[in-house]
Image (cartoon, grey):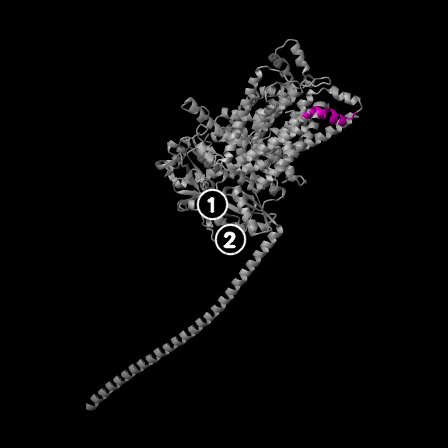
Amino acid sequence: MVSTNLSIVVSVIALLVAAGGITYASIRLGDIDSVNSNLVSKVNSISSDVTSLKSQIGQLGQQQADRLKAVEAELAERKAREALIDAARKEGKVTIYTSQTIEQMEALKKRFEATYPGITMEFIRALGGPLTERLQTEFAANKRVGDVVQGSQEDFVVYKERGWLEKYLSPELKGIPDIYKDPDGMNVAARIPFYVVGYNTKLVTGVDVPKTWDDVVNPKWKGKFSIGDPFVHPSTLVWFDAMKQVLGNKWANFVTQMRALNPRLQVSLTPVVKQIVTGEVSIGLTLTSSMFPELAAGNPVAVAPVEPLVALPNKIAILKNSPHPNAAKLYFDWFLSDATMKFLAEFGDTVSKGYAPDAYAKYIPSVKYTVRALTERESDALKKEMGLPWN
Amino acid sequence: MHLDGLKVSAIIAAAIISFLVITPLAWLMFGSFWSKSPGIAGELTAANYVNAYSDPLSYVALFNSLIYAVGATTVAFALGVPLAWAIVRTNTPFRRFFEVAVILPYMIPGILYAVAWVFLLSPKTGLVNIFLMRTLGLGGAPFDIFTMPAMIWVDGLTGVPLVFLLLSAVLRNQDVTLEEAALIAGSNKFELLRRITLPIIRPAILAALMLSLTRYLELFEVPAIIGLPSGIYVTTTLIYRKIESVPPNYGGGTALAVTLLAISITLVYLYRLLTRRAERFTTIVGKSKKASTLDIGRWRYAAFAYCLTIFIVAGILPLLMLTLGSVLPYWGILSFESLPEALSKASFKHFDLAFSLTIVRRGLVNSFFLAVVGATVAMILVSFVGYITTRATFRGRGVLEALSFTPFSVPGLVMGVGILWAYVTLPIGIIGTVWVLMLAYITRFMPYGLRAVTTNIVQIHRELEEASRVAGASWLKTFRHIMTPMLRPGIVAGWIFLSIIFLREVSTSILLYQSGSEVLAVAAYSLFNDNKWEAVSALGVVMTGITLLLNVVARKLAGSTAVAV
């Protein structure tokens, strides 16, 4: 009995011992495992360190290489630029078709010729239909004169359609918002004047100064309001189109009220300023670029705080297969350069690189809309809707 | 022998005229039947005409054009005919001075002449209105510049010098034996005027009428400056509207211009019909006496007052406005109270600005060249053509005359397109130079020179040439020694006129000039579009001065005895 009991006890002990051993062994083995895994992870981390060191070393090399490349690229660019200037100088001349004022263009000519001695800048002030006709004849007869063309956005639709524009991705395009760039790289808006209501400061004072678009079409301006003739002047018509967005469902009423003012209709928005300054009318719709010279001269005209405002992009492009292609590129780059853009701002232009004359700076945030180019059919429909012609 | 010379000259002159006129016109006609601008692929179509003539505005504009042309011609003649007679034929005091002075309105650039009148007659700011309202105590402005009658008035005044120049050459060459006969027969002086003088100068009057009507149909400046803002369209401003749009509708513009062309060709035809029996108007015969001065007694003071009034109203007032505009700080509200203050700020800074511009400096040289050389070349050409169309008896001389007249009735902008197309396609490298401008000016304004010489030639009896021929002189020699001296008044009148026009031409030049061939009038027009009215006024004052100078020099060179105008 005792022996049976003992054997049971021994067995139990043996079992216990075995269990303990097993447990111990298993615990030990686990330790080894963890040590092992530690070791592995350490090795891994070392190897990753090595990799990262390696990659860091690689990156350093890459950076070095990149830097080298950048230097090379810059050198190449500088070389290309030198080559461009050289080639332009060989061409000796660049001819610009432009809608900018003679005074502005003469000032630009002086600056350009001072920057690039040996290259003469000629300009021909031409607008609208006659300019299109000149270009048409030049291209048809293959007797080319113009290298660069600058003018209203609407006209560029026709130019592009007729294949007169050259693609050119100028290095100076950076810094200009994409909305001002042609998706095909064929032109870019540089000067962005906007439409403003101007008033004669001697005839209109205090509470009479219009503050809202409703004030502008107030019957008290009957016979005293001037605007470009939307039937004739495309840039005035596109403003009415943009005003649809500004005024929403009040637009139709706005147009009716304006027509009831019996406005003095001008061939463009520029003479409107003169009408205001001379006192022929009291208020009128014009462009910032047209108004600036009168403001600068201290003549009795001011911008009425009517908002929001609409912008009218003015574009520049190189003409296809122009007679002086290198000088054209050089001028294009120079025109869009910060220095020239700042200079234009001093001349009263708001530009797509963000500069603006002090007189207009505070209105920039209110410029929330941009005119769109209308197709012929859209123009006709709009004219019908507005009941044009008005007189 | 002489006939050969005449024939050869006739053929050469006809060839030149035909070339000058037909090339651009052919392009224009083609353009009016082409669906796109010439040069772009398109097709033959009548759509331009259908569109142009289905627009009711076309008819309104045409009707306005006719009223305008007839109205302004009436004003120009009512004022101009008595003026010419008083200055050329009577002993009105200071008539030598008035001879030059009355041309003044024509020397002022067209755009500025219109602007100056806006400043005189505007209901709000017009000085004349302000003055009259003040002195007469009126409640409202008596005049409104933005109306058809005012437009007619202003442009009628620009026509007075035309009437004067065309008629004075004829009046001066008039044979006085008829008048003397009438006086001996007991006519009084008014009867003399009515029954002798007027019938004798009838061809010249008819020619001037025809020219004047056509000119007003084609004229652009006053209808643009005064008419467009007031909504009064005439055919030329309607054409302008079509051409100014992008893409330009030249086909439609040309289709409209064809109406004006048809009207003026009818006028030429009528004129030829009325002056067919040219001999009837011959007044210079071998034994004739040169016109003498008629003593009109105390009426001469009335005549003097009349000349002075026209000189002041048509010339001095607008020129004064122009001069003020060029020295005052800016064109603006001028009241009689603010004038002294504004005058104290007067300066020459606008002159400085204007003449600092490259385009103005080049324009000065080019315009001067075109006025002097261009007018001379033109007068040499038209003297031959004029002689041939009145003297030679070959078939088609009527066609030649009508041809020379055609470009005149095509609005300048439209004609500029035709000339551009014509010379850009021809293999002669004159496009973009002053030479193409000269050709364009000669082509367009030949009729002025032609009228001046032909009315003169018609008066000269053949017997003088016949005598020369009998004496054995060749035709050219006869032309040189007999005709040219007799024609001198007409040639000088034509030259002066053409040089003035060449100096002020804008609408054709706009399409044809390039950098290097800028002209003053285009510079003025561009500056005007830039709102630089002050600088334009400065330019206008200088241009008026140049014209005046040319005029005086031409008279001096022509010799005092032969001075025509």
Q: Secondary structure at mark 2?
A: helix
Q: Residue furthest bottom?
A: A3
- Residue at 60% x, 13% y is B190
Tag 2: amino acid: Glu
Which amino acid type is marked by label 1?
Asp
Residue topped by disc 1? A349
Residue at the limit of the structure toward the left, as seen here: A1
| Front in this rendered view, residue A62 or A336 | A336
Spatial separation of the CA atoms under disc 2 and disc 1: 18 Å
Identify the residue at the far top of this view.
B186
Q: Is residue B371 visible?
A: yes
Earlier residue among tags 2 and 1? 2
Q: Report the magenta stretch's main SS.
A: helix
The x, y position of residue B18, in whole percent, is: 68, 31
Looking at the picture, how far across and down is residue B266, in whole percent? 61, 23
State the residue at coordinates (21%, 89%): A6
Residue count near mark 2 (Cα–Cα under 10 Å), binned few <14, some 14–19, many ≥20: some
Instruction: Tell me the chain of label 1.
Output: A
Residue A132 lies in quadrant = top right
Please state, as top left, top right, bottom left or bottom right, where the C terminus of chain B lies in the image: top right
Q: Residue A391: percent from the left, percent from the top?
A: 46, 29
Magenta residues (range): B473-488
Any magenta on residue B266?
A: no
Chain to which mark 2 belongs: A
Q: Secondary structure at mark 1?
A: loop
At 80% from the left and 22% from the top, the residue drawn is B471
Q: Which residue is mark 2?
A: A172
Q: Is residue B266 left or right of residue B147?
A: right
Q: Quadrant of the N terminus of chain B?
A: top right
The verdict on residue B478 being magenta is yes
Mark 1: few/some/many CA within 10 Å (<14, 14-19, 20+):
many
Please tell me which residue lies in front, A251 or A367: A367
